[in-house]
Amino acid sequence: MKRITAIILIYTLFVSACSKSNDDDNFSGALKKEPLQITIAKPESNARFQKNDTVFIEVFLWDELSLHDYVITIKNNNGFEYYSKAGHTHFPEFTVSDFWINTAKAGEDLYLEVIANNHNNFIQKEKIKILNP
């Protein structure tokens, strides 16, 4: 529970501490609202991992203007969090490469979820299932 509270607190600090860049003013209020794109390259959806396997994580984030922040989690059906990574960027493209050692007990369904937003407060979510036989 403390970990979830810490993640929410960090996310709130990122959102409130970052102001929109002056580049947004160049559009004279007519901002292009292209959706933020999330691509989960690794692991593949429904990939199978045994206990103590290394799960490589690779996520590509893209936005036409600029990204703001992201959170990547691996959770089970009950919401227990095995992995979490949060970050903040102002680039229009960003790649997250990381890994996690599978510590989940056999038979648990796991879900990798990515939540990201841009400076227009557009939020995008992407979620895949990871099999843990």
Image (spheres, rainbow, N blue to C red):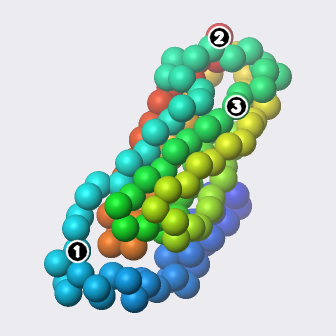
Q: How many marks?
A: 3
- Residue type, mark 2 in image: Pro
Dot 2 or dot 3, earlier in sequence: 3
Q: Position of residue 123 (x, y in %)?
A: 36, 59
Q: Residue at x 50, y 76 (%)?
A: 15
- Residue designated by label 2: 133
Q: Residue at x 35, y 61 (%)?
A: 64
Left or right of 117 on screen, residue 27: left
Q: Position of residue 72 (x, y in %)?
A: 58, 48
Q: Secondary structure at mark 2?
A: loop
- Residue type, mark 3 in image: Phe
- Residue designated by label 1: 31
- Residue type, mark 1 in image: Leu
Q: Position of residue 28 (x, y in %)?
A: 20, 87
The quarter of the rendered structure image containing the C terminus is top right
Left or right of 94 on screen, residue 64: left
Q: Residue at x 30, y 88 (%)?
A: 25
Circle on res. 56: 3
